[in-house]
Image (cartoon, rainbow, N blue to C red):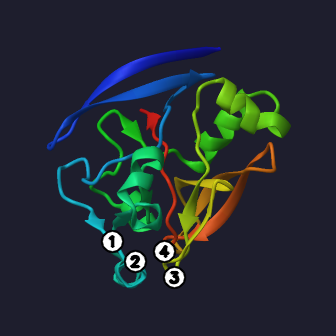
């Protein structure tokens, strides 16, 4: 069962529309998050070099970037966020949405009723994922057109590591891994 709707999101800097898709009992944004401020309007640091990425992570600062630091990549894929942005108490997700827990990601995958074909089924259900690559903890970029990673809000034993979900070009499964807050991944929001 799928249901597509438009939701009006108002931020301090602009008004934008977010398309959503209902899969099972959950309503997800059908695009990756693309914000540069927290819910309260405070700016999230944009980093443009490997050194700035490393420094933000060493200092535990929330940060975002475009893939390869190119705005043109942002228009297609959205923004990559470090885990400090995802876990910040000011709220990365717009009002009415949240960063999903790993359990909520599992629920999404179970809703496809065939975990071995989750990737194909998610696209058929208008989840609209793009293989936008990621940013290493050291700042380098990798695997555009090969993989997409999304953060969850589930921290792994208070270790500055979190559960992430990912899809690879040569696999049908949505997989899980635990990686550090100093990596750069996309964010997909779930309605409260």
Q: Residue at x 50, y 17 (%)?
A: 4
Please state if 115 lies on the left or on the right of 44 as rendered: right
User: Mark 3 to mark 1: distance in Å?
Assistant: 13 Å
Task: Give the numbered dot on residue 138.
Answer: 3
Label 3–label 4 contact, CB within 8 A: no
Q: Residue at x 34, y 23 (%)?
A: 7
Label 3–label 2 contact, CB within 8 A: yes
Label 3–label 1 contact, CB within 8 A: no
Give the residue number, with chain letter if any, for mark 1: 47
Question: Where the C terminus falls, by quadrant?
Answer: top left
User: Mark 2 to mark 1: distance in Å?
Assistant: 6 Å
User: Mark 4 to mark 2: distance in Å?
Assistant: 8 Å
Tag nearer the camera, 3 or 4: 3
Task: Give the numbered dot on residue 182.
Answer: 4
User: Mark 4 to mark 1: distance in Å?
Assistant: 13 Å
Give x and y (percent) for residue 42. 18, 57
**How many numbered callouts?**
4
Label 2's element?
helix
Give the residue number, with chain letter if any, for mark 2: 53
Give x and y (percent) for residue 155. 54, 63
Label 4–label 1 contact, CB within 8 A: no
The mark that comes first in sequence, 4 or 2, is: 2
Label 4–label 2 contact, CB within 8 A: no
Give x and y (percent) for residue 149. 60, 55
Label 2–label 1 contact, CB within 8 A: yes
User: Mark 3 to mark 4: distance in Å?
Assistant: 8 Å
Q: Residue furthest left?
A: 12
* Label 2 CA crowd tier, 10 Å (few <14, some 14–19, many 20+): many
Give x and y (percent) for residue 147. 66, 55
Task: Name the one closer to the observer, 86 or 47.
Answer: 47
């Amino acid at each position: 069962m799928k249901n597509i709707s438009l939701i009006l999101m108002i931020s301090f800097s602009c008004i934008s529309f977010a398309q959503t898709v209902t899969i099972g009992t959950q309503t997800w944004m059908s695009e990756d998050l693309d914000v540069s401020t927290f819910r309260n309007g405070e700016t999230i640091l944009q980093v443009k070099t490997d050194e700035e990425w490393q420094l933000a992570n060493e200092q535990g600062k929330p940060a975002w970037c475009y893939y390869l630091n190119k705005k043109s990549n942002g228009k297609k894929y959205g923004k990559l966020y470090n885990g400090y942005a995802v876990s910040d108490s000011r709220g990365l997700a717009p009002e009415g949405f949240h960063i999903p827990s790993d359990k909520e990601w599992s629920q999404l995958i179970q809703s496809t009723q065939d975990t071995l074909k989750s990737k194909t089924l998610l696209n058929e259900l208008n989840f609209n994922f793009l293989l936008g690559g990621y940013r290493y903890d050291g700042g380098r970029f990798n695997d555009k057109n090969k993989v997409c990673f999304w953060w969850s809000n589930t921290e792994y034993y208070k270790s500055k590591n979190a559960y992430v979900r990912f899809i690879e070009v040569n696999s049908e499964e949505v997989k899980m891994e635990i990686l550090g807050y100093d990596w750069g991944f996309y964010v997909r929001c779930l309605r409260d």
